[in-house]
Image: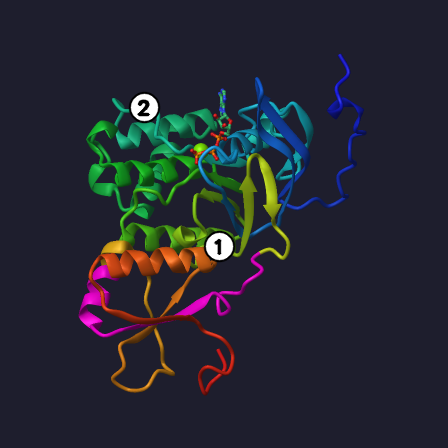
Amino acid sequence: MATTADAVPPVTPPATPPAIWARGLSRAFGEVRAVDAVDLDVRRGSVTALIGPNGSGKTTLLLMLAGLLAPDTGELLVAGADPTRSAQARSRIGWMPDAFGTWESLSATEILTTMGGAYRLGPTQSRRRAAELLATVHLSEFADAPAQVLSRGQKQRLGMARALVNRPQVLLLDEPASGLDPRSRIDMRTLLRSLAQAGTTVLISSHVLAELDEMVDDAVFLARGATVSSAGLLAATSAQRRWRLHSLDATALTVWADRAQVRLIPDTDAPAGAATVLVELPDERAAARLLADAVGAGVPISELARRSAGCWSRPI
Ligand SMILES: Nc1ncnc2c1ncn2[C@@H]1O[C@H](COP(=O)(O)OP(=O)(O)OP(=O)(O)O)[C@@H](O)[C@H]1O
Ligand SMILES: [Mg+2]
């Protein structure tokens, strides 16, 4: 049966497509249009955030990009090929789902060597790769422990290691930062930045951009299955997203920021002795949330303002 979508002629991909290229990508579940005519360009060697609220289609989109779910319509190239049609293309992709899955009775090493086998690494090579990756995600001490004894955050890290076994060109991560403590988050940021530096393309989903603080170069926003903005792509530069925060009690501010996982940036331009710091926030809504949270926790905030040019003696 012809549908409206069928009537749209296929789009010819560019001669040298970006690492992830999609046009008119759609997938429905019954009446729900989970992903609705999404266009996507993710450049090689970048870390790009895929941001959207619950049910906005992030997982559905990532599953299609990973070649694990067939689109209803649309064109798609990941690392140069269509992963829904080509096993070779899938072998160039690393996929980390939002939940660890059903591997729990295997040890961390067994999980990684099993993946290695699936990617046709020999037993020695698989074991070497497993040890290397467990060290990378700081889980060497759990090498022989069954995955079920790992904490949620440790499982997240093992999931990251599993996604890296095949040295993917494109790494797709579904909410990897949720459940990570601040230290693990910094480790993840370091790991992703070094992978990107070496040419790996990373697409990473989250509900809020702030969670991926300093991890990403670009951001794509999804709402009800459609991209709502990806121009530019991070329209606001990190400097433009900075807000000045003044507390009457520096200790209370630091204690709260630690607990709330808010990164406080020292403000070198602030007058000496002032408990003034900078925070990076994507928008005013995030600023309002941060203020409510801090005040609710008893931090005596006396000022929160967008750090605009001219506010301080030195330009940002
Ligand atoms: N297998 C499925 N069967 C039916 N509906 C589905 C299925 N998978 C997803 N959906 C629906 O598609 C929409 C998008 O879901 P999806 O899981 O992609 O969102 P998400 O952005 O990843 O959400 P979350 O932040 O909660 O993980 C939702 O309305 C969801 O109910
Ligand atoms: Mg999801």
Q: Which residue is mark 1?
A: 216
Which label is found at residue 77? none
Q: Residue at position x 23%, y 68% from top?
A: 300
Q: Of circles 2 and 1, which is in front?
A: 1
Indicate the amino acid at tag 1: Val
Q: 37 or 31, which is in the foreground? A: 31
Q: Is 150 displayed left or right of 111 in the figure?
A: left
Asked if ligand 1 lies within 8 A of label 1, the reply is no
Residue 222 covered by magenta stretch: no
Q: How many marks?
A: 2
Give the crowd class for mark 1: few <14, some 14-19, many >=20 residues within 10 Å.
many
Can residue 157 be seen? Answer: yes
Check the image and report above or below for 25 versus 199.
above
Front residue (pair 176, 255): 255
194 vs 222: above or below: below
x, y percent for residue 87: 58, 25
Q: Amino acid at mark 2?
A: Trp
Residues in magenta?
234-257
In the image, taking residue 144 as reference, residue 241 lies left or right, namely right
Q: Is residue 82 left or right of residue 124?
A: right
